[in-house]
Image: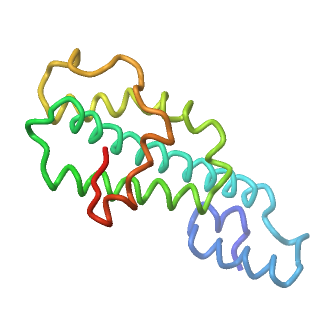
Amino acid sequence: MFNSVTLHDRDFHAWTFQQSALLREGRLSEADVAHIAEELESMGASERRELINWLAVLMAHRLKWQFQSALRGNSWRNAIDVQRFDVKESLEENPNLITNLNERMAKSYLKSLLLAVRETGPNRQTFPPCCPFKAEQLLSGLYEISRGYHKM
């Protein structure tokens, strides 16, 4: 049998099953507690990064929707709907991420600007320098959209 630290480094998948079995069997003294704690923290950070990415994409599409109204189309509407759905689902599954959501949005706004500028052209001055959205405003509309009442 492999040393658990070595197994963690060599075959992460096998290590996860080994550690799960040890925990379920109550064999805590044999568990690789330090790596388990590290992996749990990493999972939490991953959820936060995923939410920030979804927020950035959602805000980029909302920026394009708001500031390039002549180019609005179903693809942007669908992208907004999908990102809203993903953000809402993430927040429902991880309610702690709602804490400081407006601050997380402000941090991810730079990324949304980069995405919007890349897709619309080099004129970054078209968009506000700071995040113009509040969480409630950004996430509202999914249910209205699904019923045909598209309110942006």
Name which residue lies at 60% across and 47% down.
Answer: 45
Number of marks in picture: 0
Whether residue 23 is situated above or below residue 46 in the rendered picture: below
Q: Residue at x 42, y 25 (%)?
A: 131
Q: Which residue is located at x 48 percent, y 34 percent? A: 134
Q: Could you tell me which quadrant the C terminus lies in?
A: top left
Of the pair 40 and 138, the residue shown nearer to us: 138
The residue lying toward the viewer, choosing from 73 and 26, is 73
Which of 41/96 is in front? Answer: 96
Q: Position of residue 72 (x, y in %)?
A: 13, 44
Q: Quadrant of residue 53?
A: top left
User: Is 125 on the left-hand or right-hand side of 84?
Assistant: left
Q: At which x and y percent is residue 8? A: 64, 64
**Coordinates of residue 95 in the picture (x, y in percent):** 65, 54
Q: Position of residue 42 (x, y in %)?
A: 62, 51
Residue that protrudes farthest toward the left in the picture: 70
Report whether 75 appears left or right of 49: left
